[in-house]
Image (cartoon, rainbow, N blue to C red):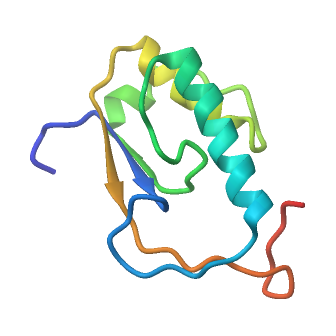
Amino acid sequence: MDGKADVVYGSRLSGSGPHRVLYFWHYAGNTFLTLLSNMCTNLNLTDMETGYKAFKKDILSRIDIKEKRFSFEPEITAKVVRLKCRIYEVGISYSGRSYEQGKKIT
């Protein structure tokens, strides 16, 4: 909102608020996928797979999104890096869902 960023990622892992503790392997998988993305893009994100992302309209209009599922996350990350966007990451509050509550990914 201060005009410092073109893209903002919310991070469930660097948030300052409390968060629900759930599945280790989901955390490990997310951390691994974020590491791979960081290696390919030379970023230091903590949570590439976050569902909270904000884009300036002109940035988003310049990106042709191909993916329709979870592969959207690395695609959009690589494309905003290619556009040399100013990327910021902010901590978000997070309450993870159990499978009984509707968690979809296995």
Q: Number of callouts in the render? A: 0
Q: Residue furthest left?
A: 2
Foreground: 43 or 28? 28
Q: Quadrant of the C terminus?
A: bottom right
Q: Does residue 73 sit above or below 86 in this rendering?
A: below
Residue 75 seen in the current view: no
Please tell me which residue is depicted at 41% across the width and 55% down the height of the picture: 10
Q: Is residue 52 left or right of residue 24?
A: left
Q: Is residue 62 left or right of residue 88?
A: right
Q: Is residue 99 left or right of residue 45?
A: right
Q: Does residue 15 sit above or below 76 in this rendering?
A: below
Q: Is residue 101 left or right of residue 50?
A: right
Foreground: 16 or 94? 16
Q: Residue furthest bottom?
A: 100
Q: Residue furthest right?
A: 106
Foreground: 28 or 90? 28
Please tell me which residue is depicted at 44% across the width and 38% down the height of the picture: 45
Q: Position of residue 42 (x, y in %)?
A: 45, 18
Q: Does residue 45 sit above or below 50 in this rendering?
A: above
Q: Position of residue 17 (x, y in %)?
A: 36, 78
Q: Position of residue 85 (x, y in %)?
A: 32, 23
Give the image quarter of residue 43: top left
Q: Position of residue 31 (x, y in %)?
A: 63, 45
Residue 39 seen in the current view: yes
Please tell me which residue is depicted at 75% across the width and 59% down the height of the picture: 26
